[in-house]
C-alpha cells in the first residue's frame, strides 16, 4: 500500500485560518457582523476538532466572541441511511449552543466531503433542532464522487481522487500528528 | 463493535458491549430532553411487544423507546388474544413472523421462553428478553447499571464501567429475575455484589454465584457501606409458601426505612425496580428521598431500551428461519 502526504501540518493550519476568515467574511456580508447569529457545528469525530480550531481562529480575530454560543457538535449516527447495512457505530454527544439554531447561520464542519451522505444526515438532524436561517458547509478536503446534490461553501483543499483511494485526515488530538494522507 | 442480534441474558454481553450500550443510551438520554423527542433511525421496522405477563412500566418503556426511534409498534398481550383460546407460543410466533416483525420483545411467565423463541427457528426477528419467569430481565439490569453510573459519575459517565462499586441487593433473591440479571451484569462491569435476604429467600445453591451472602441488612449497611442499595419487590404472586413469618417482621428486618437511610454514606443511592410495595420492602420516606433513584430508573429505562433496540436492529442480519 502506497501513501502520500497531500497536506502538511502547516498546510492544514493555513487552510483552517483561511476557512475561518471566509466564514467571517460571508457572515459579515449577510448579517453586518462577523459572529452575529453564527453557529459552528462539528460533525464527529474529526469535524468536531476542526470546528474547535476554526472557532479558535475566529475568537482571535473577533475579540468579543463567546465561544460557548458559537461552537457546538452534531452527532449524525442515528440519521444515517446505511444503518441497516453497517454494523452499529457509537453514538456520541450532540451539543447545540444555548441560543439554539433558530434563525441562525449554521456552518457544518466535517473533515472529508465524499458521497455527501453524512451531510444529508446532518441536514436531517438539524431539522429536529430548529429552523436555521441558512446552513453552510465547511470541509478540510473535498475529494469528489458525490452521490447527492450537495456542495461545500468553504473548502480547505480540492483533491481529485480515485474512488478506491482512501483519504486519511490525521489531527494531533486523536492521531498525534497533523497531516492529510492519500492511500492507494 | 458487532452487537448480538438478540438480548436474552445479561451474560450475553461482554464488558465492552455492555459499556457500549450504556454509552449509546447516554446519547439517547439527550434525545429525551429535546423538544422533538424522535429519531428516524428505525423507520420502517416493526417491533412487537409480546407480553404474556402483566406489566406496566416495562411494556410502556419499550413502546416509548421503539416509537422514539420511529419504529412501528404492535402491542400484544396474552389477555384478550388468541392465547386465551389456547394458541401455543409456536403458533403465535409464526403468526408474528408472517406479519414481518423485525424485533420481538417478549415477557413470559416461563423461565427460558425468550431463549426458546430465539433458537426455535420460528421467527427471524431479533428477540429481546423483557423478563422470563424467575430467570432474567437483562434490560432492567442495564438500566440499573446506567442509573448507578449516572449517579456516581454524572456527565463523565461515558466509557466507564462500575469497577469497585459495592452494590447490596436486598429481598427476594430466590424469585427475582432482576437480581439474577443484575448480578451477571454487575460482575461483568466489575462491581461487587452483596445479596441480603432471609435464608428462605436465597437460592438453595448460591455457591456458583459471584456474590457475598448476608442475612442482616443492618450489618451490611454498617460493615460494607455500599454505594448502592437495591431493594427488590416482595413478589406476592410467586409466594406459594411461607417464606417469612409476617409482613411486619419482613419490613422491620429487611425493609428499607428512614433509620437505615440515615446510615447511608454521602452520595449513596437507594434503588427499586418497581412496582413498590410501600411500607413492606421500602417505606415512603426512603422512596421519596433525594437518595432514591426510583423515578430516575423509569426515565433511564426508555433511554436504555432505545439503545438496546438500536443495537439489535442495526446492521445486516442473516435470514435463518428454518
Image (cartoon, helix red, strand yellow):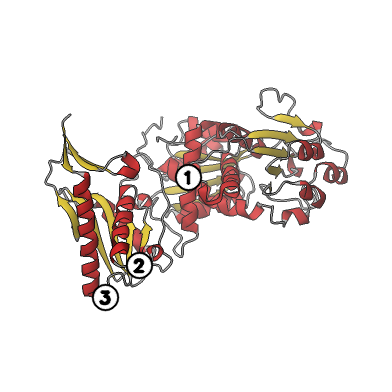
The secondary element bearing badge 1 is classed as helix
Q: Residues within 10 Å of mark 2 (few under 14, many from 20)?
A: some
Of A7 and B253, the residue lying toward us = A7
- The residue singled out by tag 1 in the image is B23
- Picture residue at 27% right of the left edge, 74% below the top: A33
Residue at mark 3: chain: A
The answer to whether residue B319 of the structure is visible from this angle is: yes
- List x then y, in percent, for residue A91: 41, 47
Q: Residues within 10 Å of mark 1 (few under 14, many from 20)?
A: many
Judge from the rendering whether residue A33 lies leftward or rightward of residue B217; answer left or right.
left
- The residue singled out by tag 2 in the image is A65
Residue A31 tag number: 3
Q: Residues within 10 Å of mark 3 (few under 14, many from 20)?
A: some
Q: CA distance from mark 3 to mark 2?
A: 15 Å
- Picture residue at 54% right of the left edge, 32% below the top: B115
Residue A101 to residue A164: above or below: below
- List x then y, in percent, for residue B130: 57, 42
The answer to whether residue B104 of the structure is visible from this angle is: no
Q: CA distance from mark 1 to mark 2?
A: 32 Å
Residue at mark 2: chain: A
Kindly indicate the quadrant of the structure image that contains residue B236: top right
- Classify the position of the C terminus of chain B by image quarter: top left
| Pointer 1 with pointer 3, Cβ within 8 A | no
- Picture residue at 43% right of the left edge, 45% below the top: B310
**Are labels 1 and 3 assigned to the same chain?**
no
Judge from the rendering whether residue B81 lies leftward or rightward of residue B243; answer left or right.
left
| Pointer 3 with pointer 2, Cβ within 8 A | no
Of B77 and B49, the residue lying toward us = B49
Amino acid at each position: 500500500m502506497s501513501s502520500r502526504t497531500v497536506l502538511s501540518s502547516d498546510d492544514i493550519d493555513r487552510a483552517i485560518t483561511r476557512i475561518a476568515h471566509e466564514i467571517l467574511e460571508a457572515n459579515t456580508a449577510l448579517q453586518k457582523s462577523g459572529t452575529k447569529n453564527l453557529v459552528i457545528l462539528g460533525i464527529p469525530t474529526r469535524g468536531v476538532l476542526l470546528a474547535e480550531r476554526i472557532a479558535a481562529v475566529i475568537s482571535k480575530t473577533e475579540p468579543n466572541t463567546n465561544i460557548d454560543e458559537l461552537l457546538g457538535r452534531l452527532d449524525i449516527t442515528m440519521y444515517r441511511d446505511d444503518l441497516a447495512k453497517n454494523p452499529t457505530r457509537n453514538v456520541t454527544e450532540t451539543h447545540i449552543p444555548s441560543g439554539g439554531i433558530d434563525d441562525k447561520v449554521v456552518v457544518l464542519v466535517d473533515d472529508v466531503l465524499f458521497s455527501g451522505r453524512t451531510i444529508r444526515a446532518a441536514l436531517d438532524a438539524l431539522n429536529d433542532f430548529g429552523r436555521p436561517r441558512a446552513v453552510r458547509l465547511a470541509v478540510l478536503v473535498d475529494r469528489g464522487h458525490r452521490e447527492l446534490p450537495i456542495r461545500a461553501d468553504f473548502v480547505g483543499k480540492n483533491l481529485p481522487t480515485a474512488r478506491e483511494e482512501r483519504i486519511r485526515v490525521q489531527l494531533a488530538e486523536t492521531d498525534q500528528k497533523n497531516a492529510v494522507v492519500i492511500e492507494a | 463493535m458487532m452487537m448480538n442480534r438478540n438480548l436474552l441474558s445479561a451474560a450475553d454481553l461482554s464488558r465492552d458491549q455492555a459499556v457500549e450500550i450504556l454509552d449509546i443510551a447516554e446519547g439517547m438520554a439527550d434525545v429525551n430532553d429535546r423538544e422533538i423527542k424522535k429519531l428516524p433511525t428505525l423507520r420502517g421496522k416493526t417491533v412487537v411487544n409480546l407480553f404474556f405477563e402483566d406489566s406496566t412500566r416495562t411494556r410502556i418503556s419499550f413502546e416509548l423507546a421503539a416509537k422514539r426511534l420511529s419504529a412501528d409498534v404492535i402491542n400484544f398481550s396474552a389477555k384478550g388474544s388468541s392465547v386465551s383460546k389456547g394458541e401455543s407460543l409456536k403458533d403465535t410466533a409464526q403468526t408474528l413472523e408472517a406479519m414481518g416483525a423485525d424485533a420481538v420483545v417478549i415477557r413470559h411467565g416461563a423461565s427460558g421462553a425468550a431463549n426458546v423463541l430465539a433458537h426455535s427457528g420460528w421467527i427471524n426477528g431479533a428477540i429481546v428478553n423483557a423478563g422470563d419467569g424467575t430467570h432474567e430481565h437483562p434490560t432492567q439490569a442495564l438500566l440499573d447499571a446506567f442509573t448507578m453510573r449516572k449517579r456516581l459519575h454524572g456527565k463523565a459517565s461515558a466509557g466507564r464501567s462500575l469497577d469497585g462499586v459495592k452494590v447490596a441487593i436486598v429481598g427476594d433473591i430466590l424469585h427475582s429475575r432482576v437480581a439474577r440479571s443484575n448480578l451477571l451484569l454487575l460482575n461483568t462491569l466489575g462491581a461487587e455484589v452483596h445479596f441480603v435476604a432471609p435464608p428462605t429467600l436465597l437460592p438453595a445453591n448460591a455457591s456458583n454465584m459471584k456474590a457475598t451472602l448476608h442475612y442482616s441488612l443492618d450489618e451490611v449497611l454498617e460493615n460494607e457501606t455500599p454505594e448502592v442499595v437495591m431493594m427488590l419487590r416482595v413478589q406476592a404472586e410467586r409466594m406459594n409458601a411461607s417464606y417469612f413469618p409476617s409482613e411486619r417482621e419482613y419490613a422491620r428486618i429487611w425493609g428499607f426505612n428512614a433509620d437505615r437511610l440515615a446510615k447511608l454514606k454521602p452520595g449513596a443511592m437507594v434503588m427499586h425496580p418497581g412496582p413498590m410495595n410501600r411500607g413492606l420492602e421500602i417505606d415512603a420516606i426512603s422512596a421519596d428521598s433525594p437518595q432514591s433513584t426510583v423515578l430516575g430508573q423509569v426515565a433511564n429505562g426508555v433511554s436504555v431500551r432505545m439503545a438496546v433496540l438500536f443495537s439489535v436492529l442495526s446492521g445486516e442480519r442473516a435470514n435463518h428461519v428454518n
